[in-house]
Image (spheres, grey):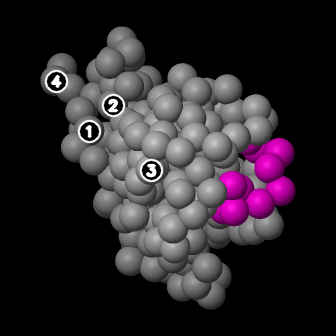
Amino acid sequence: MGRRYFSLALLTEGASDQWFLGPLIDRQIADLAQRPTVGFDYSGIVTGECFTVAPRAAVVREVSELLQYFDVVMIHHDHNERAKVDAIREHFASDAFRIVGLVPVRETEAWMLADTDALREASPSSDSAWEVPHDVEKIADPKAVLKAALGGRREVERSFDRLGRTIALEKLLKLPAYRRWLDELRTAMQELRFL
């Protein structure tokens, strides 16, 4: 039997989340692809046409469409919108396991702070006066800390793609919300017999 092809669609709250999460998720799945006994091929994430902050009916329609073509649909929300993932799943009883929630403790930017080496590489200056707290998921305003870490410039989002490509996966695995997301993804992939 040949290797199977794993397909994944992502819906995020906004474009800047896609810039970070797209390359990060691709790297994490490529890492998973090296480990399984069954094996699978994967060519990269596809982003949906709407953001998860759209009206619920629009998100449900988008998820319904994506489930026809993709093995897993990943839905990103920040912590204050956590219940929306379960509300979407309720519309898809038999396929609910194929809808994976990606929900940081506060905001996605906290995950970007997990690897200070990657932050230094993405920073436009060599000034290392900033300091990232040890437990990044407890930072009250991760966006402000990230902005300071990236030199205080206005358009910090320009570094999100680079951080998604360079942040150390092993550092992210120390974050409970990241592990929760990865466990949920693994469970869905196991049920689909990719892992």
Q: What element carries label 4?
A: loop
- Badge 1 element: loop
The answer to whether residue 166 shows anywhere in this view is: yes
Could you tell me residue 25's position as x and y percent?
A: 43, 44
**Disc 3 or disc 1, which is closer to the eye?**
3
Per the image, the residue denoted by label 4 is 2
Dot 2 falls on a residue whose secondary structure is helix
- Could you tell me which residue is drawn at 23 percent across and 33 percent down? 41
- Residue extending furthest toward the top: 37
Image quadrant holding the C terminus, namely: top left
Q: Earlier in the sequence, mark 3 or mark 2?
A: 2
**Magenta-drawn segment:** 136-145
Tell me which numbered mark, 3 or 4, is placed earlier along the sequence.
Answer: 4
Residue, disc 1: 42
The amino acid type found where label 4 is placed reads: Gly
> Of residues 127 and 152, which is closer to you in this image?
127
| Residue drawn at point x = 69 percent, y = 55 percent | 145
Q: Is mark 3 on a helix, strand or loop?
A: loop
Quadrant hosting residue 80:
bottom right
Residue drawn where x is 33% and y is 52% of the image: 45
Q: Earlier in the sequence, mark 3 or mark 1?
A: 1
* CA separation in Å, label 3 and label 4: 49 Å
Closer to viewer: mark 3 or mark 2: 3
Is the Cβ of the residue at disc 2 closer than 8 Å to that at disc 1? yes
Quadrant where the N terminus sits is top left
Residue 79 coordinates in the image, percent (x, y): 76, 60
Report the residue marked by disc 3. Answer: 125
Front-most of residues 151 and 57:
151
- Proximity of marks 3 and 1: CB atoms separated by less than 8 Å: no
Q: Which of marks 4 and 1 is nearer the N terminus?
A: 4
